[in-house]
Image (cartoon, rainbow, N blue to C red):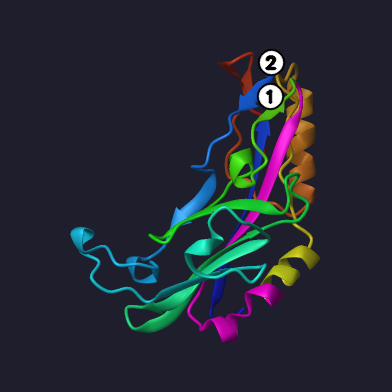
């Protein structure tokens, strides 16, 4: 897409050795910092005298009020060194705790947080049972256009409509034989992925990886 670049992130958290508890906390979890020009308020003490940022979410909330709200995406945009630009984080609707609760601040911190405090409208603590996997999928979108040109709502719909391919494949943990590793490697390659390195551990110790 002209003027638009993105990174798709799929994060799999696997409880391999007992239950795992993700605590309820407002700070987190998947995010980034904007360019200082896209902050919503200046910070003279940090050398940011003037800012040009605006923020909005998929629900029509704007400015600093997007903090603690649930939405499919959050978009910061404005002028970066005098030129139009912005960033957005899109949360895939198949994420378990959708719509996502956002830790998005007026000083340029933007983060999707599936463990946000319940008192602030979040989902709170998550206990992941042993052997289960919690998956989070996001698109980080970067553009050099105005908000009217980039049309984040349309970008989000395209993200939803496009198959996420290839997806991450979780190995059984621990892996007891090299044959399962070889089968997973073969599957990933046939689905269009490019593997440059494969590592493997058995019971916490480095083991011989499957051949590429």
Q: Residue furthest front?
A: 119
**Alpha carbon separation for disc pair 1 and 2:** 6 Å
Could you tell me which secondary element the residue under label 2 belongs to? Answer: loop
Identify the residue position indicated by label 1 in the image.
Answer: 15
Percent x, y of residue 185: 73, 38
Percent x, y of residue 20: 65, 23
User: Dot 1, crowdedness within 10 Å: few (<14), some or many (≥20)?
Assistant: some
Query: Is 143 colored magenta in this rendering?
Result: yes
Q: Is residue 43 rendered to the left or right of residue 206? A: left
The structure residue drawn at horizontal position 80% and vertical position 34%, both measured from the top left corner, is 183
Q: Is residue 172 rendered to the left or right of residue 69? A: right
The structure residue drawn at horizontal position 73% and vertical position 22%, both measured from the top left corner, is 178
Q: Nearer the viewer, residue 23 or 175?
A: 23
Quarter of the picture containing the C terminus is top right
Can you see residue 121? Answer: yes
Q: Which corner quadrant of the image does residue 99 belong to?
A: bottom right
Percent x, y of residue 210: 68, 30
User: Dot 2, crowdedness within 10 Å: few (<14), some or many (≥20)?
Assistant: few
Q: Residue 121 — which label?
A: none
Q: Nearer the viewer, residue 209 or 76?
A: 76
Percent x, y of residue 77: 48, 74
Quarter of the picture containing the N terminus is bottom right
Can you see residue 116? Answer: no
Magenta-colored span: 131-154
Is 52 rendered above or below residue 124?
Answer: below
The structure residue drawn at horizontal position 35% and vertical position 67%, both measured from the top left corner, is 41
Identify the residue position indicated by label 2 in the image.
Answer: 18
Could you tell me which secondary element the residue under label 1 belongs to? Answer: loop
Query: Is 138 colored magenta in this rendering?
Result: yes
Q: Are marks 1 and 2 in contact (CB under 8 Å)?
A: yes
Is 40 rendered above or below residue 33?
Answer: below
């Amino acid at each position: 897409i002209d003027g638009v670049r993105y990174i798709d992130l799929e994060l799999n958290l696997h409880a391999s050795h007992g239950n795992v508890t993700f605590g309820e906390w407002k700070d987190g979890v998947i995010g980034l910092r904007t360019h200082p020009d896209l902050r919503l308020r200046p910070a003279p003490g940090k050398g940011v005298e003037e800012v040009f940022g605006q923020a909005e979410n998929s629900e029509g909330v704007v400015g600093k009020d997007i903090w603690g709200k649930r939405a499919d995406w959050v978009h910061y945009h404005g002028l970066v060194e005098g030129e139009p630009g912005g960033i957005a984080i899109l949360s895939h609707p198949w994420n378990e705790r959708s719509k996502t609760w956002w830790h998005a601040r007026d000083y340029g911190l933007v983060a999707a947080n599936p463990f946000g405090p319940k008192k602030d409208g979040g989902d709170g603590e998550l206990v992941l049972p042993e052997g289960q996997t919690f998956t989070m999928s996001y698109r980080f979108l970067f553009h050099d256009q105005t908000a009217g040109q980039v049309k984040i709502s349309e970008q989000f719909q395209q993200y939803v409509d496009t198959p996420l391919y290839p997806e991450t494949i979780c190995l059984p943990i621990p892996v007891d034989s090299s044959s399962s590793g070889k089968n997973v490697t073969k599957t990933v390659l046939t689905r269009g992925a490019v593997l440059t390195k494969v590592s493997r551990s058995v019971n916490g110790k480095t083991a011989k990886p499957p051949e590429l």
